[in-house]
Image (tube, helix red, strand yellow):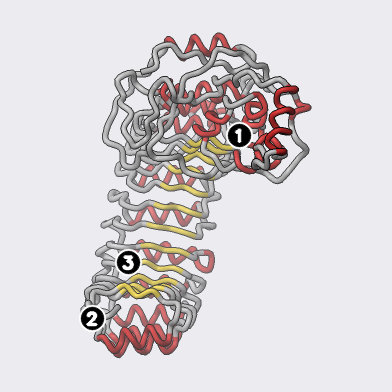
Amino acid sequence: MVQNIVFLVGKGSSSISSDLSSSTDQTSTKAPKNAAASEDSDLSMRTLSTPSPALILPAQPPLYPHSSPHPHLHPLSPFLPPSTPFNGSSSTSSSETVAMVHAAAPPPPFSSTHSRRRVARDHHQGASVPIDLLPDHVFLDVFARLPTDQLCRCARVCRRWYNLAWDPRLWRSIRLTGDVLQVDRALRVLTRRLCQDTPNVCLMLEAVVASGCRRLTDRGLHTVAQCCPELRCLEVAGCYNVSNEAVFEVVSRCPNLERLDVSGCSKVTCISLTREVSLKLSPMHGQQISIRYLDMTDCFALEDEGLHTIAAHCTQLTHLYLRRCARLTDEGLRYLVIYCPAVRELSVSDCRYVSDFGLREIAKLEGRLRYLSVAHCGRITDVGVRYVAKYCSRLRYLNARGCEGLTDHGLEYLAKSCPKLKSLDIGKCPLVSDAGLELLALNCFNLKRLSLKSCESITGRGLQVVAANCFDLQLLNVQDCDAPLEALRFVKRHCKRCVIEHTNPAFF
């Protein structure tokens, strides 16, 4: 493995190099939910200065790296434990891998005379146009589609690529993956490099995505909070070593944060400002956390009191996902509706204590609610669905899978009050029959997705009515239903673009 690695980041590179080569992180490890491999390489010993402003191109549309890294390469060896093996089909060894941070200084360029002769010779021989002849904006378009590790790898190809790879427009987001990546160190070195022109503050960085990096701890988020005041998006799904303290610091120091994903972070039980910040602000200003999108799926320790605090501080929430937060009850939903009247999408799937009373509170969101998931909430019946249907007439998506108390009467309320419904999942609702399905089809003509999986009372008659009225149907799930072959063919004939998921071996 790599023994001596020097990180060169322009000004002040020697201190960063010694810091990284001498320090190691010891972080507790557990099995991650989602983990992707990462890439790595050795570094040359050349030092480069920060690109001058003259090298920055004229303003163009914002560029964001968004593609996923190759699953077999490991470009982040400086941040991997010394004993970490490189598994995968790639033959890349530790001496051939590329460092995460721009530590890679480019190799010495060819002389201009040699380059001109080579280009002339290739052109004379009819060879393809050298890549060096491509204009800078084409390179930037390509680099914008690379994840952070591969972008750093490109920075060491040559001097020109180095300058282009560190164009500020390419560093509006940092995306790290890998269950053994020492992500705390990676974030520290990257932010230090990006703070060169504005000491201690990285003004260009707007998004940090480290989902599945199980070695991420509060120290990594502390670095982000200290250096990235313009952060708008933070995704740390599955990073179960992150705690409330670090999350509080991020939301306190990053006032523009709008999107926060802490799903699977079992230690996170609340979202709030730090005590120090709260004391400095008036009660009204203390509630101004600008988060609009919050995903706390699988935050098992979240309780009603925690949801109360979240709602009181994050009053601008529009998207909230609380899947499998099994300790929540109807009382927590009451707090949510009081403080967050702008919620458009809400999921409380698998929250077994949520009942019809909770749906009555949710119904107070009225026409603002577009998406609702109450899947596997066994205490919900037609009464709760009737509340939602009556007051939330603009509902577009409803997932009521596994709500065994739902019957044809609930579908009738839904069909007559929510005619613009586009997606409905009522799988595993044994009391729903053809009668309710016919009422739905005769009122909700815009229906595009319908799941009837394991609805034992549904037969071919109900399916034919759906197909005859919902021409825009794109997905129909009738797995484990008593759907005859003729009905399936009828659906296929009338709904040309519909994908039918079924368990009938005779239909293909």
Question: Contact, CB < 8 Å: mark 3 with mark 2?
Answer: no
Front-lying residue, 113 or 255: 113
Mark 2 lies on a secondary structure that is loop
Residue at image mark 2:
506
In x, y percent, where is residue 21?
Answer: 44, 12
- Residue lying farthest front? 125
Q: Residues within 10 Å of mark 1 (few under 14, many from 20)?
A: many
Work out whether mark 3 precedes mark 2 in sequence or the reverse, and give the earlier one. Answer: 3
The amino acid marked with disc number 2 is: Ala
- Image quadrant occupied by the N terminus: top left
Residue at image mark 1:
171
Work out whether mark 3 precedes mark 1 in sequence or the reverse, and give the earlier one. Answer: 1
225 in relation to 322, above or below = above
Residue at image mark 3:
356
> Which mark is in front, 3 or 2?
2
4 in relation to 252, above or below = above
Number of disc labels: 3
Q: Residues within 10 Å of mark 3 (few under 14, many from 20)?
A: many
Residues at marks 1 and 2, CA–CA distance in whole angstroms: 54 Å
Mark 3 lies on a secondary structure that is helix
Residue 454 as seen in the image, left or right of residue 113: left
Mark 1 lies on a secondary structure that is helix
Residue at (27% x, 80% y) in the render:
507
The amino acid marked with disc number 3 is: Asp
In x, y percent, where is residue 261?
Answer: 44, 43
User: Which of the 4 quarters of the picture holds residue 62?
Assistant: top right
